[in-house]
Amino acid sequence: MPEVAGPAPSHSRRLAREVAFQAIYMSMVGGVEIERALEVALSRHTLAEDAESFVHELVTGVRANVQELDDAFSPCLATSWTIDRLAISDLVTLRLATFELLRLPDMPPKVTISQAVDLAKRFGTKDSASFINGVLGSLLKETDKAEWESPIVVDPDPPEPEFLELADQDEDDDQAEPVEEGVKAGSWVIKRDSEEPTASE
């Protein structure tokens, strides 16, 4: 019988962000070494070389600059909130997006924020998307990207209406792929719409 071809490697940066999120989340919650968590997260998707490189850039960048990233977005939290009160899913999303805003000068900020909101919808609580949107919107005003200008492009996969002011098209939005329902690292499983991991059977 002829071999069945697997899925074509994806160049999607949207998917790459989700894989980076999964790796960092698994490492933080499951106590998994980041290298192992990254290996597991990557193994569940077929990424092209450029997308996999982007995953490594995000994970390495966040891990190497945690204090700088936290210090950057902390002033944008409500006065009654501190980092240690954040859901881990929200913290990971904020760190990833803050890294992009501060350390990736060629990445359009509206793409960063729009896709961070999408991560919050997928993996956070019911209030996470609006929370992430607000914090990053405030942070953007304090960065070098505050006056970013780029051509207006219609996003083929826009977020909900309340976030349209931050919607923009990533270069690969039309290649977006869904994330699997559960992502395992050892005995830990990431479940959507949950702040805590659950042990697998």
Image (cartoon, grey):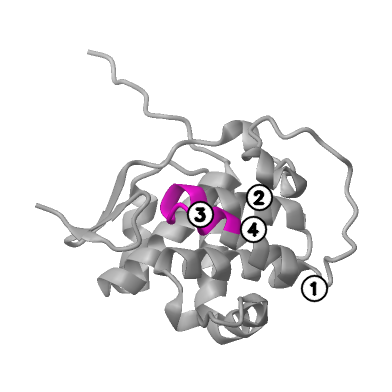
> What is the CA distance from the residue labelled 2 to the residue labelled 1?
17 Å
Q: Can residue 172 be seen in this view?
A: no
> Going 81% across and 69% down the picture, which residue do you hit?
141
Residue 143: which disc? Answer: 1
Q: Nearer the viewer, mark 1 or mark 4?
A: 4
**The disc labelled 2 sits on which kind of residue?**
Ser
Dot 3 and dot 2 residues touching (CB under 8 Å) = no
Q: Foreground residue, 133 or 40?
A: 133
Dot 4 and dot 2 residues touching (CB under 8 Å) = no
**The disc labelled 1 sits on which kind of residue?**
Thr
> What is the CA distance from the residue labelled 4 to the residue labelled 2?
8 Å
> What is the CA distance from the residue labelled 1 to the residue labelled 4?
16 Å
Q: Is 156 drawn above or below residue 150 in the view shown?
A: above
Residue 133: which disc? Answer: 4
In the drawing, does residue 27 fall left or right of residue 163? left
Q: Residues within 10 Å of mark 1 (few under 14, many from 20)?
A: some
**Mark closest to the chain's N terminus, 4 or 3:** 3
Instruction: State the residue position of label 3.
Output: 120
Where does the magenta region start and end? Answer: 120-130
Dot 4 and dot 3 residues touching (CB under 8 Å) = yes
Q: How crowded is mark 2: few (under 14 residues within 10 Å), some or many (20 or more)?
A: many
Q: Can residue 15 be seen in this view?
A: yes
> What is the CA distance from the residue labelled 4 to the residue labelled 3?
9 Å
In the drawing, does residue 40 fall left or right of residue 66? left
Whole-percent x, y for residue 3 in the image: 29, 20
